[in-house]
Amino acid sequence: MTISIDLSGKTALITGATGQLGRVMVQTLAQCGADVIIHYKHNQKHAAVLRAEIEALGVRGFVATADVGEYDSMMAMKAEIESNFKLPDIVVTNAVTQIFPWKTVLEEEVEDYDNQFKSCVMQNVHAAKAFVPHMVAQKWGRVIGINTEVSIQTYETQSAYAAGKKGMDGVLRVLAREVGPDGVTVNQVAPGWTISYKDRQKGTEIQESYAKTVPLRRRGEDSEIANVVAFLGSDLASFITGAFIPVNGGNTFVGV
Ligand SMILES: NC(=O)c1ccc[n+]([C@@H]2O[C@H](COP(=O)([O-])OP(=O)(O)OC[C@H]3O[C@@H](n4cnc5c(N)ncnc54)[C@H](OP(=O)(O)O)[C@@H]3O)[C@@H](O)[C@H]2O)c1
């Protein structure tokens, strides 16, 4: 008998689905048979492209928008999904508001801490309030937060991003305890600096100075992150909750 990741009959919501990693998660979960809610903030055009791509695979897609840092916006998206599609069984909180360049604590604008708090911490609070009650009611659900190796590294200039992601970690570990008895698992995937379509377009896949510190001596591929998300979303991961899984070639061994 062959074991495969089978998400048929499940509906997954990916936030930030039009971004570098989100678009591969959409494709991967659809390849596993899930119907996918493709969330975007600005990039409606690529959300429509993704929907057409996955519908060609024979699953259903639905495009939805919200500012994940705003409670009312998340709840409006929930209402739209509930009226026009299906509430998700699997929620992947992947969206992030990028700040660039990262600066030292003394130089980073105060507003950057606020927006990281909203997009990392409050996104997960809002998503839980919007979508976990349905999972609890049906006694099955998956919340998968996309964290980062940065929240373990805490190197210079990473303070706003690390603070947001460490706060998200706190919310999700507590949520795992609270909803475990109801059959809902809550886990996190923490990518390293990952190769995406942007690198492939620009030819910037190889980054020697980063790769030489990684035990597996390379950067990960976007598909390697999406594969772990698919696994955690499936029944193969039925006894895993509260986990924080670095997917970074061993670049950080602690924090699990
Ligand atoms: N890429 C990496 O190497 C890497 C490494 C470690 C961790 N991660 C984590 O992986 C996740 C995805 O990263 P990525 O590199 O794919 O990021 P990305 O390409 O910047 O995509 C993030 C998406 O989030 C959406 N977004 C931003 N602010 C939002 C808001 N307030 N409300 C709703 N949506 C919002 C944007 O959607 P629109 O474009 O539609 O506006 C954007 O496309 C993040 O959680 C990140 O921290 C990534």
Image: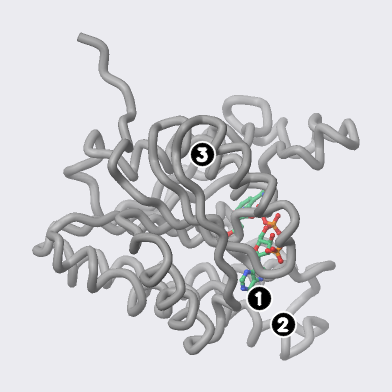
Q: Residue furthest top?
A: 1
What's the residue type where badge 1 is placed? Ala
Location of residue 168 in the rendering, given as x and y in whole percent from the top left corner:
45, 71
Asked if marks 3 and 2 touch (Cβ < 8 Å), the reply is: no
Mark 2 = which residue?
Answer: 112
Mark 2 is surrounded, within 10 Å at the Cα level, by few (under 14), some (14 to 19) or many (20 or more) other residues, namely: many
Q: What whole-number distance in Å separates the C-alpha atoms at marks 1 and 2?
A: 6 Å
- First in sequence: mark 3 or mark 2? 2
Location of residue 200 in the rendering, given as x and y in whole percent from the top left corner:
81, 32
**Residue at coordinates 72% horizontally, 89% vertically from top-left?**
111
What's the residue type where badge 2 is placed? Asp
Q: Which mark is residue 195?
A: none
Mark 1 = which residue?
Answer: 160
- First in sequence: mark 1 or mark 2? 2
Quadrant of res 164? bottom right
- Depth check, mark 1 against mark 2: the one in front is 2
Q: Does the residue tagged 2 have its C-beta within 8 Å of any atom of ligand 1? A: no
Q: Which mark is residue 226?
A: 3
**Residue at coordinates 69% horizontally, 46% vertically from top-left?**
49
Q: In this view, does 51 lie to the left or right of 123?
A: right
Mark 3 is surrounded, within 10 Å at the Cα level, by few (under 14), some (14 to 19) or many (20 or more) other residues, namely: many
Q: Is residue 157 above or below residue 19?
A: below
Q: Is residue 186 above or below residue 192?
A: below
Q: Does the residue tagged 1 have its C-beta within 8 Å of any atom of ligand 1? A: no
Camera-side residue: 38 or 148? 38
Q: In this view, does 48 lie to the left or right of 87?
A: right
Q: Can residue 252 be seen in this view?
A: yes
Location of residue 194 in the rendering, given as x and y in whole percent from the top left corner:
67, 41
- First in sequence: mark 1 or mark 3? 1
Q: What whole-number distance in Å separates the C-alpha atoms at marks 3 and 2?
A: 28 Å
Q: Residue furthest right?
A: 202
